[in-house]
Amino acid sequence: MNINDIKSPAHATAGLAFILILSALMAFTSLSTDIYLPAMPEMARSLHGNAELTVTGFLTGFAIAQLVWGPVSDQLGRKRPLYIGMVLFIIGSAGCALSSSMHEIVFWRVFQAIGACTGPMLARAMVRDLFARTHAAQMLSTLIIIMAIAPIAGPLLGGQLISYSHWPSIFWLLASIGALMLFSLAWLPETHPEEKRTSTSLKGAFKNYRLLMCNKEFMRFTLCVTFYYTAAYAFIVGSPLVYINYYGIDPQHYGWLFAVNIVGVVLLSTVNKRLVQTIALEKLLKYSTAVASIMVMLLCLSLYVKPDAIIPVVACIFIFFSMNGIIAASATAAALDAAEGVTGSASALIGSLQYGSGIISSLVLAWLSNGTPWPMTGIMTLFTLMSLFMAVKNYTNSPAAR
């Protein structure tokens, strides 16, 4: 570790427990969504509604609440908002399990998200509190590797649960996980000491968002990862219906097809820890978004030539999704580096746009759904190309390109 990469003496507390807890906090988004993906067809039948709206509700609450939690964490520190968030998550999860209509569960998914969003947002902020640009990217890659357990285990566990029980049991499990995380927070250090906290009012802190949105460097990196996540969420939300209904995959086996993509993310995250030491983040983003773009275009070609063949679909999506191991960590680290002094607010805005992008995917999929993979594939292609455009724009404006 280069001494220039250390921002705070609190780095000494960044041991195994710190890394594991932060990884779990970052996994809250994927866990809260991925674990019930195999149950979405059953939920749609049981609650007589469009199950994609449960994802829309969650991401809406997730995106909006971060904009409040970010400034709050800059004022109060990172730990107190985490405690409050975990309690809200537990209550929301229980509310989902007890819901008897689609309207009810969408409401409780919003409530659940208000608490869940504190996890990944403040985990990113805590890393940035302790480490500078390059080492922050390495740490984020490490967290992504460990947090990958959630999206691998989530659909597999969810598929097994609904084979023995019904969909509410999944949300009771989430409530239990939330309770476990609540107790684990005691092992986390406070990475944002009082002398670095802002003293402005919450209303005044919201002005940071306007300043951040006027920060061209910050927004270019943020939009790069936001557009990529819009494409990724199109797959996450659309894949249960595509794999289970269109290709006839058993819900219990769907989890394996989903998990293989996360293995790719883990592999690329491992490689990225080394790449960031020698290659500029801007160049990594350019190449990774280019590969993702090629894959979604090949996916379109495959569906056009041989629409009933699932293997080319799985292969193209595997490589596309694997690029998350580079894109998410590199773009986030570069964006936060451009927002020195307002890390909490910057992390909140990144998370709000990044995960809020799934609202677009889920709503458009619910609107265009026609029983084929084309709506999912179309969204993936459009937004991956937009991510590539922002990455190339970043690269041409960076010192590494000159």
Image (cartoon, helix red, strand yellow):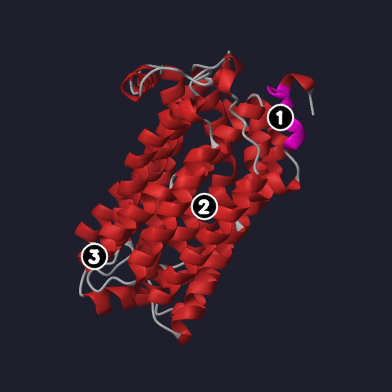
- Is the stretch drawn in magenta largely helix, strand or loop? helix
Which of 323/332 is in front?
332
Relative placement, left or right, of 247 versus 177 is: left
Residue 53 seen = no
**Residue at 45% in and 53% down:** 87
Residue 244 seen = yes
Up-down relation of residue 181 to residue 71 (above or below):
below
Disc on res. 104: 3
Quadrant for residue 288, please give it.
top right
Would you say residue 12 sits in the magenta stretch?
yes
Disc on res. 10: 1
Give the number of the mark in front: 2 or 3: 3
**How far from the left and from the top, in percent, is residue 247?**
39, 76
Relative placement, left or right, of 202 versus 141 is: left
Relative placement, left or right, of 82 versus 386 is: right
Mark 2 secondary-structure assignment: helix
- Going by the picture, which residue comes out furthest to the bottom? 164
Classed neighbour count for the residue bearing mark 2: other residues with Cα under 10 Å, few (<14), some (14–19), many (≥20): many
Mark 1 secondary-structure assignment: helix
Q: Earlier in the sequence, mark 1 or mark 3?
A: 1
**Residue at 29% in and 54% down:** 57
**Residue at 55% in and 39% down:** 79
Q: Bounds of the magenta span?
A: 5-13
Separation of marks 2 and 3 at Cα, in angstroms: 32 Å
Mark 3 secondary-structure assignment: helix
Quadrant assignment for the N terminus: top right
Up-down relation of residue 176 to residue 365 (above or below):
below
Separation of marks 1 and 2 at Cα, in angstroms: 34 Å
* Numbered-mark total: 3
